[in-house]
Amino acid sequence: MMISPEGYYEEHLKGKTKEQIMTAIRGLKQEIGHLKNTMESPDYGKELIMHPSEDTRLHWTREYLERAKQAYAEAGGTYTLSKLEEKVADFDANIDAILKITFSFGGFFGGYRSYVVELSDGLKAYTKLWEDEEPLALMDVDKEEPFTRDTFMAALMDLHIGEWRRRYSTQRFGYTVCDGTQWELEFEYSNGHKPVRIDGDNSYPYNFNKFQMLFGIDETEEDEDE
């Protein structure tokens, strides 16, 4: 069972010096990295998942980290963003300027299906496979209603995509996979920000399934396309 952020503060941070709090911050950041690496491993899910799950622990560790940063400031510290945190802050600061999202995945034999979301005037989505283009209805599964531009962007924000690596590969875990599934994600902006591109080869971010659900994609559909 996970404790609340205030419970974490009372148990681990209250009365500590800023140096001690910074040590806790480093530990929380390491734990977040460890949890994401565990969930991104090709072997993840092959064994029984412990409770609370890595996903739950990741959520609450993020909350503890934010509370620890607050405590650090209250103790007189000035927090300096890491390179990763600067990248996250940049992505989040420009999220409202996203003009177009293109998400493509597939393989050599089955072709590559693209899911395109245009945000210049409301919310328009469609899919493309080879030369065929079809409209796409984006549904908020939790609320069981169509996404609006605002609710879609809020769901996108919750995925912490700014933390994602620029490239995902099984080689990171000592695996080499031939063929299989490749994917690419591109964000284009209306404010002059350079496009953000992320891609992968049979390897995915820890919350990739949640991302796919924004487009109504599930594993069954992927299997059919392959």
Image (spheres, helix red, strand yellow):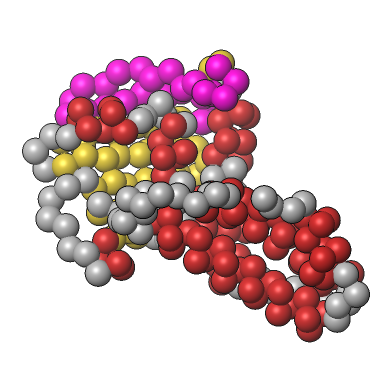
The number of numbered discs placed on residues in the rendered structure image is 0
Q: Position of residue 148 (x, y in %)?
A: 58, 22
Q: Position of residue 133 (x, y in %)?
A: 26, 21
Look at the picture and state if 15 lies above or below 33.
Answer: below
The answer to which of 137 and 21 lies nearer the viewer is 21
Looking at the rendering, the stretch of residues picked out in magenta corresponds to 119-144
Give the left or right position of residue 162, taking residue 65 as reference. Answer: left
Look at the picture and state if 187 lies above or below 124.
Answer: below
Give the left or right position of residue 108, taking residue 160 as reference. Answer: left
Residue 195 visible in rendering: no
Answer with the quarter of the image where residue 220 lies. Answer: top left
Q: Is residue 87 magenta?
A: no
The residue furthest bottom is 19
Q: Quadrant of the C terminus?
A: top left
Q: Residue at x 62, y 29 (%)?
A: 150
Residue 163 visible in rendering: yes
Q: Position of residue 212 (x, y in %)?
A: 40, 36
Q: Residue at x 21, y 39 (%)?
A: 106
Look at the picture and state if 61 lies above or below 130.
Answer: below
Q: Residue at x 62, y 36 (%)?
A: 154
The answer to which of 90 and 45 lies nearer the viewer is 45
Answer with the quarter of the image where residue 170 lies. Answer: bottom left
Give the left or right position of residue 210, taking residue 203 as reference. Answer: right
Q: Is residue 132 magenta?
A: yes
The answer to which of 191 and 66 lies nearer the viewer is 66
Give the left or right position of residue 118, taking residue 146 as reference. Answer: left
Q: Position of residue 108 (x, y in %)?
A: 11, 43
